[in-house]
Amino acid sequence: MPVRKPKVVVTRKLPDPVETRMRELFDTELNLDDRPLDGARLASAVGRADVLVPTITDRIDAAVIAKAGEQLKMIANFGAGVDHIDVAAATERGLIVTNTPGVLTDDTADLTMGLIMAVARRVVEGSEVIQHGEFHGWSPTWMLGRRIGGKRLGIVGMGRIGQHRPRRDYRRRVISGHAGEGRAGRRGT
């Protein structure tokens, strides 16, 4: 008699490699149209799942958890937080609630640097000028912005992401090259 694979219900579209691996390991039900599930669909999902894989768009409150079947053992959140899950109600039902802490640290730190660059170099403002047909040619001081090289970066809040940003900026190696050097490139720091 074949062993039954756990039924995993995924509430939103996840990256293809994740969904592929889940289908290999579990009896996986995917949300192919990638629309948030309403309360009725979430209640139905917890009624048939062994594991529910929600995201931050899913409100897993006490009413949804009350609809869980006896087979539901885990709510495995695809995301860093659990603010959208009634953890107390889940714990009372004997459910394990997991998340993925730290998974977005690099991405959030990268976005922070992108925002700093965009503000300093007036990227959004320049894009709007172009999109509105208001660009009338280059000028030496137009949209000059500010350099960030050699500046101090003040970080308010030295949590996980605040501590990660400086480590990413100042400990990476840079590889550069110039076509006129006569070789493929040279290493620098």
Image (cartoon, rainbow, N blue to C red):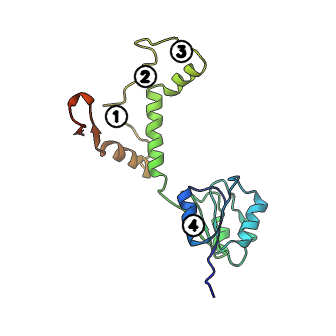
The quarter in which the N terminus is drawn is bottom right
**Residue behind mark 4:** 22
Work out how far the residue at label 4 is from the one at label 1, CA to CA, in angstroms.
45 Å
Is 116 displayed left or right of 76 in the figure?
left
Q: Amino acid at mark 4?
A: Met
Which tag, 3 or 1, sits closer to the chain's start?
A: 3
Which tag, 4 or 1, sits closer to the chain's start?
A: 4
Q: Indicate the secondary structure of the residue bearing disc 1.
A: loop
Work out how far the residue at label 3 is from the one at label 4, CA to CA, in angstroms.
50 Å
Q: Are marks 3 and 2 in contact (CB under 8 Å)?
A: no
Which label is found at residue 53? none
Q: Indicate the secondary structure of the residue bearing disc 3.
A: loop
Q: Which residue is at the far bottom?
A: 1
Work out how far the residue at label 3 is from the one at label 2, CA to CA, in angstroms.
16 Å
Q: Nearer the viewer, residue 149 or 32?
A: 32
Which label is found at residue 145? 2
**Pair 3/2: label in front:** 3
Is 90 displayed left or right of 38 in the figure?
left
